[in-house]
Amino acid sequence: MEPRNFKEILYQKEDNGIVTVTLNMPKRKNAVSPYTFYELYQAVEAMEKDEGAQVMILTGAKDPEETDPTKEAFSSGGYFHPAALEGLSDEVKSRLDLTDIAQKKFTLKMWRFDKPVIAAVNGLAVGGAFTLCLSCCDLIYCSEHAWVSLPFVALGILPELASSYLLPRLIGFQRAKEIMFFSERLTAQQLFDLGLVNKVLPHDQLLPYARERALQLIPPRGAAKAVRMVKRTLHQPFLKAVTEALDLENQGLNEAFKSEDFWEALAARAEKRSPVFKGR
């Protein structure tokens, strides 16, 4: 698929080597569907084939009708509505593995992708939106208005994108369990204090700062070959464990999606009430 044909993301390449990939479904707060991940995979493949595409900045589209920067969304997480598959060709549908809920194929693609990836988190990042950054981005910069929630347990499911392996190793098992068990909402400053993001910036400085950092990683200012070698060297020893985590996540997610608690959580959200779980 050519980047110009993307429907749910924007792929913008500049002459200086920066590629900005924007989650571009603002009316649903940039929620990511299986098709979104398919396009993200294609975006990475496009960069792999293009020597002139040297660094990716990943961010979320702003809703043109929203003027309050505190209400911007990087992404509101997973979008599982049947409408996500409407209008897709049979060929594209055949390429979507709906049992790969943990996004194993995409995550491993990102772990083997040696060009640097910078997340510019411009607003809320819920569930899979933040695990996308955590697992697939090398540097994470946040707007001061950004916040994160990992509401997997509240939905009767479990984390994905190998975050079940990565998060406890970044912040410790007890804190990771607490955040996951209770679906804590974390501010940008809390994320920084935990060591989960690299820097918190005034909202209007986020993208300029991400761009400046990107330029420092590529010629003429950055030794891009060394950056790529460092990334490969850091990632390679973890690939086996990340792969195992993704398999375990997929096993659990496919089981959880059939559970009464998951469907009760969805019904409760639709009906704007508290769920009544039965533990099955």
Image (cartoon, rainbow, N blue to C red):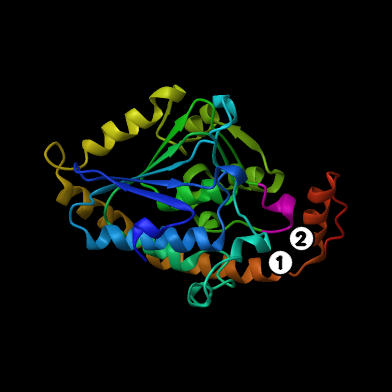
Task: Say what amino acid the circle numbered 1 marks.
Answer: Phe
Q: Position of residue 40 (x, y in %)?
A: 42, 58
Q: Which mark is residue 147?
A: none
User: How many residues crowd mark 1 within 10 Å: few (<14), some (14–19), many (20+)?
Assistant: some
Residue at position x 80%, y 50% from top? 270
Image position of 252 (left or right of 102): right
Residue 123 belongs to the span the image colors magenta = no
- Compared with 229, 184 (above or below) is above
Residue at (53% x, 45% y) in the render: 172
CB within 8 Å, label 1 to label 2 = yes
Quadrant of the rendering where the N terminus is positioned: bottom left
Give x and y (percent) for residue 175.
60, 42
Residue 88 appears left or right of 18: right
Residue 263 lies, with reference to residue 12, above or below; the image says below
In the displayed structure, does residue 187 sit left or right of residue 199? right
Q: Is residue 236 among the parts visible in the rendering?
A: no
Quarter occupied by residue 229 = bottom left
Please give the residue where the numbered disc 1 appears in the rendered image.
Answer: 257
- Picture disc at residue 262: 2
**Quarter of the rendering containing residue 112:** bottom left
Residue 182: image x %, image y %?
Answer: 71, 43
Return the residue nearer the eye: 248 or 270: 270
Q: Position of residue 227 (x, y in %)?
A: 21, 48
